[in-house]
């Protein structure tokens, strides 16, 4: 670039397009240099100081000259304001899109246009801010387009390579895809927008119809081995009521279960679940009319439940508690005290430890006794110490027939590297009593450690209460006041068979095991990045391919 301090006359009329000089602009710039070698002429006067009717010297008479930096900045500010208006009021902005391009072009050619080197800005020619004519103007830091005040919605950003929207005639069958197309899975604005996770594509549901409870869990996978609960349901239905005496499901019990399952069916219908698994356990396994009851459930609710084996039930209980087993554990005895059966699994982690806890089950058993059946045999309302001892002896006799192989992890029972892990309402009740909770709180109970002495104190406390006192406790309630001591008798027998210094409480069970297995087999945690399952991209009309 020619330095004006050398006394040469700048070619002020040459445009960016390389056209010939504009006489008026060249004359004005030349006169400005000749006055004080760098002091500009007044923008609104001619050479004699009189007002000029032709405008300032910075405005080129040629309509074909391109816009100088000042003009670009003005247009950029107008575009930014227009984008803010579009984000806040999209309907009028879509209609005005057709005339936007022509308005900007007319503005670029109108009276605000300037020449390549003859722009007057801040009283200095040539765009020089430091008073040195002809010196290259320093680049102003450009504010990123679309960045508005925090909390205000941003205007859509244009991605590189995106097709510019073309104005369509009013009344045509379709508008520009870039303006009216709905956002697609890859974002409405091309490659710059991250892929949108579709929550409807990665929901999993697990339903467990047990002897005492009907439970539903709908969840979404997050990090490996974890998920976020979207919806849940739990209700005490006492499906196994009277089953031990008659061998059949009673009409009242089936009616209660069907009503609860109708609620579950409504929840499943309202959420587009990707994969679901619905199971029934001991009550339907043992009852003579169990299969007929499930046919009625399918006819009235549309839910098709499967009866799982005791081995599957034990494996699911283990799979649901895998995240509660620490790296410092060599072995554990996991038990699930249910309404009609109790599953026990011995887990040895001393050899080739893997992430799937169920792979390390070395021995398991299922006792045909639960809180419902045991309380019906011995009476659950009035439980004296003698009645409690009789319950424990009955469970002891059942455990005597279980002869597991010798396992390395259990060679020294009582070691702190071996512990018990209980997943049932019995152990969660003991944890709530130990914490003296005014209301049951799963977040405080799940994962809690209890020592031998703490468990003994809670058992003695429960035995000292009558039925009314147990029903008045917020962690027990009237629905479970007659069942809790039967569960404690099963727990006491397990503690006698596998003595351990501590026990961990798990407020989880078959539903969590079902979800873990479904998500793992479906590959929900195999994805890179945030490890969410991303469905195949669905291209929307008008989207660039």
Image (tube, rainbow, N blue to C red):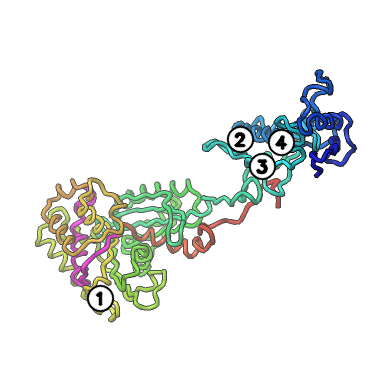
- Residue identifier under label 2: 87
Q: Nearer the viewer, residue 188 or 491?
A: 188
Query: Where residue 349 sits: x, y (%)?
Result: 34, 74
CA gap between label 3 and label 2 equals: 15 Å
**Sequence-first disc among 4 and 2:** 2
Q: Which residue is mark 4?
A: 131
Helix, strand or loop at label 4? It is: loop
Q: CA distance from mark 4 to mark 2?
A: 41 Å
Tag 4–tag 2 contact (CB < 8 Å)? no
Q: Residues within 10 Å of mark 4 (few under 14, many from 20)?
A: some
Front label number (1 vs 4): 4
Question: Secondary structure under badge 1?
Answer: loop
CA gap between label 1 and label 4 equals 98 Å
Region of the chain picked out in magenta, as a range: 477-505
Which residue: 18% across, 70% down? 496
From this view, report whether residue 407 is shown above or below residue 479: below
Q: Is 250 on the left or on the right of 174, as rendered?
A: left
User: In this orientation, does residue 274 appear?
Assistant: yes
Q: Which residue is disc 1 drawn over?
A: 402
Q: Earlier in the sequence, mark 1 or mark 4?
A: 4
């Amino acid at each position: 670039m020619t330095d004006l301090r050398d006394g040469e006359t700048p070619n002020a009329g040459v445009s960016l397009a390389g056209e010939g000089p504009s006489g008026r602009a060249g004359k004005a710039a030349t006169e400005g240099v000749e006055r004080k070698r760098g002091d500009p002429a007044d923008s609104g006067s001619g050479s004699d100081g009189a007002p000029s009717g032709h405008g300032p010297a910075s405005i080129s008479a040629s309509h074909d000259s391109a816009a100088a930096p000042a003009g670009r900045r003005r247009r950029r500010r107008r575009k930014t304001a227009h984008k803010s208006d579009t984000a806040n009021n999209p309907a009028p902005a879509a209609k005005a899109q057709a005339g936007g391009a022509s308005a900007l072009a007319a503005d670029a050619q109108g009276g605000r246009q300037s020449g390549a080197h003859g722009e007057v800005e801040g009283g200095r020619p040539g765009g020089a801010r430091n008073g040195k004519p002809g010196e290259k103007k320093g680049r102003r830091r450009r504010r990123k387009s679309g960045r508005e005040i925090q909390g205000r919605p941003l205007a859509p950003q244009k991605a590189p390579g995106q097709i510019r929207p073309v104005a369509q005639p009013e009344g045509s069958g379709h508008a520009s895809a870039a303006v009216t197309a709905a956002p697609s899975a890859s974002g409405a604005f091309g490659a710059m927008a991250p892929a949108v996770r579709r929550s409807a594509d990665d929901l999993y549901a697990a339903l467990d119809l047990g002897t005492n409870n009907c439970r539903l869990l709908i969840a979404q996978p997050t990090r490996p081995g974890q998920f976020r609960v979207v919806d849940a349901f739990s209700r005490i239905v006492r499906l196994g009521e009277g089953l031990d005496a008659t061998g059949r499901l009673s009409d009242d019990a089936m009616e209660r279960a069907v009503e609860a399952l109708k609620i579950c069916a409504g929840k499943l219908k309202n959420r587009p679940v990707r994969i679901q698994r619905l199971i029934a356990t001991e009550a339907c396994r043992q009852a003579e009319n169990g299969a007929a009851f499930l046919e009625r459930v399918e006819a009235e609710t549309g839910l098709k439940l499967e009866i799982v084996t005791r081995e599957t039930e034990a494996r699911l209980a283990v799979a649901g508690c895998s995240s509660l087993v620490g790296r410092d554990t060599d072995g554990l005895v996991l038990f699930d005290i249910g309404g009609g059966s109790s599953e026990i699994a011995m887990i040895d982690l001393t050899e080739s430890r893997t992430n799937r806890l169920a792979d390390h089950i070395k021995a398991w058993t299922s006792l045909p006794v639960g809180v419902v059946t045991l309380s019906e045999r011995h009476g659950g309302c009035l439980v004296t110490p003698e009645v409690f001892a009789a319950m424990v002896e009955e469970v002891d006799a059942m455990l005597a027939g279980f002869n597991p192989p010798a396992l390395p992890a259990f060679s020294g029972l009582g070691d702190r590297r071996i512990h018990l892990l209980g997943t049932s309402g019995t152990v969660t009740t003991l944890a709530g009593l130990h914490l003296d909770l005014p209301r049951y709180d799963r977040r405080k109970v799940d994962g809690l450690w209890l020592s031998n002495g703490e468990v003994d104190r809670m058992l003695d406390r429960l035995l000292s209460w009558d039925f009314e006192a147990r029903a008045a406790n917020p962690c027990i309630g009237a629905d479970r006041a007659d069942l809790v001591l039967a569960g404690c008798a099963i727990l006491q027998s397990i503690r006698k068979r596998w003595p351990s210094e501590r026990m961990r409480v798990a407020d989880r069970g078959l539903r969590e095991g079902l979800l873990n297995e479904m998500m793992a087999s479906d590959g929900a945690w195999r994805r890179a990045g945030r490890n969410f399952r991303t469905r195949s991209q669905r291209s929307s009309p008008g989207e660039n391919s």
